Image (tube, helix red, strand yellow):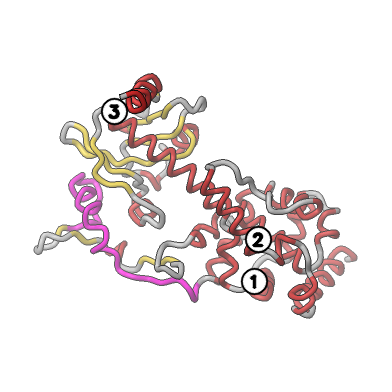
């Protein structure tokens, strides 16, 4: 009873305190200097794929709380857990833009149709390709009309851990939470699940601020792009020809699970790339990737990629970097 009362008092304070208190009096750099923090993190991410780690923007008790929330991992996003995916989807609903993207994806739709295994893609009498799955594609776009990293916030538990931590900093409750272990924080978070958490987020954050909580997504995307480029490069050396490569906000990946479309000896291959080979191997059994021919991921020693080919019963195959050749090409360029 006392514990429930404490949580009720806690939430009453957060929901009913004067907003000006933290707007004018809070000196924590992760809140008051968010613009500088964002620029710094963006510079770090641009210069290196692995420099930014979850909760790096905090220190002391703030970092302790963030680390404890992060330990809950996907529970923070999942429906069976805190279900922040629903909170974020509701909050960004007003800035999501939906459109028909069939015209934009004609090339990949052509290749997918040619495989003969995807029944929802049709070739129309005018020679264009169509699927109703691309009729109503919804995304958040930035001020330049480009895909925004906010689109991935709802499923990135690292970014959501930082968002929650900042929420409690703004509410002046970090000291209380710092005395809780991960299990206790989990129990507490369940008391604010749903509408209460949505109201807290709407009160303490403007819609534009959510972009500042995508550092981990940006970092993961950088690493993912690197592995995807490596996969394409090594497959080309193995005789494959690239036909299509997606980018951020790629609905061909979101709908069909396809990152790359490549061709070898007249046959089209649909490829899904994961950062790690272990995840690529696990993905071979997922219904989401039922159309995929080849799964790829960087090898544990980072010296190449591991391939799992559906047509070869997913027998593991390693393709290594040709380090010697690259070094020789580099030296030739210098001394030619």
44 or 103: nearer the eye? 44
**Residue projecting furthest to the left:** 125
Q: Which residue is mark 2?
A: 163
Magenta region: which residues? 93-122
Q: Position of residue 230 (x, y in %)?
A: 39, 35
Name the secondary structure under disc 3. Answer: helix
Image: 118 above or below 33: above
Q: Which residue is mark 3?
A: 237
State which quarter of the image contains the N terminus: bottom right
Assess disc 2: are there few (<14), some (14-19) or many (≥20) residues with their C-alpha within 10 Å of its C-alpha. Answer: many
Residue 262 visible? The answer is: yes
Q: Position of residue 66 (x, y in %)?
A: 72, 53
Q: Residue at x 33, y 70 (%)?
A: 99
Q: Is residue 110 magenta?
A: yes
Q: Residue at x 39, y 25 (%)?
A: 321
Q: Residue at x 56, y 71 (%)?
A: 208
Name the secondary structure under disc 1. Answer: loop
Q: Is residue 238 magenta?
A: no
Q: Which residue is mark 1?
A: 205
Name the secondary structure under disc 2. Answer: helix
Q: Residue at x 73, y 53 (%)?
A: 58
């Amino acid at each position: 009873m006392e514990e429930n009362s404490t949580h009720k008092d806690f939430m009453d304070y957060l929901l009913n305190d004067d907003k000006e208190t933290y707007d004018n009096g809070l000196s924590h750099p992760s809140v008051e200097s968010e613009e500088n923090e964002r620029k710094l993190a963006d510079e770090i991410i641009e210069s290196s794929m692995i420099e930014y780690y979850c909760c790096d923007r905090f220190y002391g008790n703030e970092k302790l709380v963030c680390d404890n929330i992060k330990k809950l991992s996907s529970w923070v996003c999942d429906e069976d857990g805190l279900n922040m995916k629903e909170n974020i989807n509701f909050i960004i609903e007003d800035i999501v833009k939906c459109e028909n993207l069939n015209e934009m994806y004609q090339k990949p739709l052509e290749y997918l149709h040619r495989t003969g295994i995807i029944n929802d893609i049709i070739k129309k009498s005018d020679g264009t390709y169509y699927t109703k799955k691309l009729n109503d594609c919804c995304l958040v776009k930035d001020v330049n009309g480009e895909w925004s990293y906010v689109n991935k916030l709802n499923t990135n538990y690292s970014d959501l851990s930082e968002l929650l931590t900042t929420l409690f900093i703004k509410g002046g409750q970090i000291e209380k939470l710092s005395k809780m272990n991960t299990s206790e924080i989990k129990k507490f978070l369940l008391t604010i699940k749903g509408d209460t958490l949505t109201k807290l987020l709407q009160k303490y954050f403007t819609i534009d601020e959510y972009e500042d909580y995508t550092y981990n997504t940006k970092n993961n995307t950088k690493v993912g792009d690197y592995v995807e480029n490596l996969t394409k490069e090594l497959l080309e050396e193995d005789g494959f020809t690239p036909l299509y490569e997606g980018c951020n906000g790629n609905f061909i990946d979101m709908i069909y699970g396809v990152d790359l479309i490549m061709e070898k000896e007249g046959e089209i291959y649909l490829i899904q790339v994961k950062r790690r080979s272990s995840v690529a191997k696990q993905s071979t059994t997922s219904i989401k990737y039922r159309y995929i021919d080849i799964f790829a991921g960087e090898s544990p020693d980072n010296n190449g990629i591991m391939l799992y080919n559906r047509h070869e019963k997913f027998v593991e195959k390693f393709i290594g970097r040709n380090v010697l050749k690259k070094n020789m090409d580099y030296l030739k360029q210098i001394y030619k």
